[in-house]
Image (cartoon, helix red, strand yellow):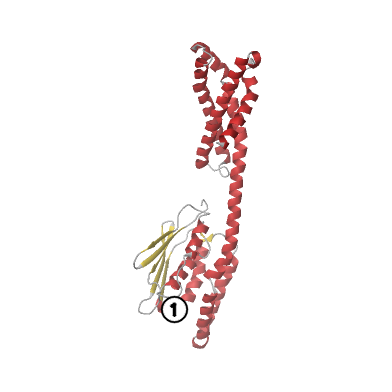
Amino acid sequence: MEKFRKYFLTCLIVATLLSPIVNPQLFESLEMFWMTITFSLIYTLSGLYGAIWLFTYLDLKYDWIKDLWKRLIIGIVAVEIWSVLIFVIITPILLYFIKDDEWPQIWVEMKKNIKYPLIMGLVGILILAPIEFFKNWKKSYLKQQKLNAEMMAYKYEALHNQLNPHFLFNSFNVLSSLVFEDQQLAGKFIDQLSELYKRVLNGKYKVLITLEEELEFIQSYIFLLKTRFEDKLDIRIDIDPSKNEFIAPMVLQLLIENAVKHNTISKSEPLLVKVERKGNVIETTNTLRLKRAGDRSKGTGLQNIRQRYSFFTDQPIEIDQSENEFIVRIPILNKAS
């Protein structure tokens, strides 16, 4: 109701200002004055609510930031058509029932005054368009700021949770054993561990990396895991990356880590993790044998991935779980997304 009052007051002011232009004989009589004001008010109210509905509909189809000129031109044409339409519908009714004009006279009046709805429609679009543009620009700016803030928080979370102290502790334990058992393998282990953390530090300021970079990153991570678990762990990667394909950093590493972290691993029952491409989606599947005690999944890692991807695509992160398998599907991003 409060919004309607504001709209009504605005339209009344506009109608009053435009009435002398619409009807130069406005002040010839009190009846002429109120009739002209009433006509103008009905037109402006109808035009305003119609323009608001049209703008709301067009906002769903065209983005003010990406499709500025297309959105502006279509908006002008739509509002002008609407202005003429309400003029053609309302004018004969008002002239016939209020002024008692005959149809020939009504037709002459309409032809004479058809320019006014076009002028009023253009004035309306010139007022509404800058308001809508800056409103959407502000929304886009705030969304970007939110993304930056959340990505800053993610950088710390990624380093702390995904390559956490437990992983580093276990890696040093493996390394201490290798130093005495296989010095050549120990040297390679150190190189891969160094490569892994170098990529983490180099990529921590990126919101997206190429799919090829992510695959190179997890090769170092897989080497460290395979050295630790040997034949208890079977990780299979079947992805052929193309140019201009992107993914959020450390996503595949997180999914592999979750599989290792939350499932039992043994020689009799090796853990199988498959990372495959299915069209424009990467599907990660692992055998499901959840640990009965100890570290339980809180779902924070998957929630982290969902939040990050929501800024780049409307495609959902799909999660399926059966009695024997746990599956996560991650969309591959491109320049358009």
The tally of labels here is 1
- Of 218 and 89, which appears nearest the observer? 89
> Could you say where residue 125 lies in the image, as x and y percent from the top left?
59, 33
> Could you say where residue 197 lies in the image, as x and y percent from the top left?
57, 72
Quickly name the residue at label 1.
229
- Of 190 and 177, which appears nearest the observer? 177
Q: Does 178 appear above or below 262? A: below
Identity of the residue furthest to the bottom in this view: 180
Identity of the residue furthest to the left in this view: 323
The residue shown at (52%, 16%) is 98
The residue shown at (50%, 57%) is 309
The residue shown at (53%, 79%) is 169
Numbered disc 1: secondary structure: helix
Q: Does 175 appear above or below 296? A: below
- Of 161 and 71, which appears nearest the observer? 161
The residue shown at (60%, 57%) is 148
> Could you say where residue 181 lies in the image, as x and y percent from the top left?
49, 87
Q: Is residue 101 left or right of residue 28?
A: left
> Could you say where residue 274 lies in the image, as x and y percent from the top left?
40, 67
Q: Amino acid at mark 1?
A: Phe
**Disc 1: CA contacts within 10 A as few (<14), some (14-19) or many (>=20):** some
Quarter of the image where the N terminus is located = top right
Quarter of the view holding residue 288: bottom left
Quarter of the view holding residue 149: bottom right
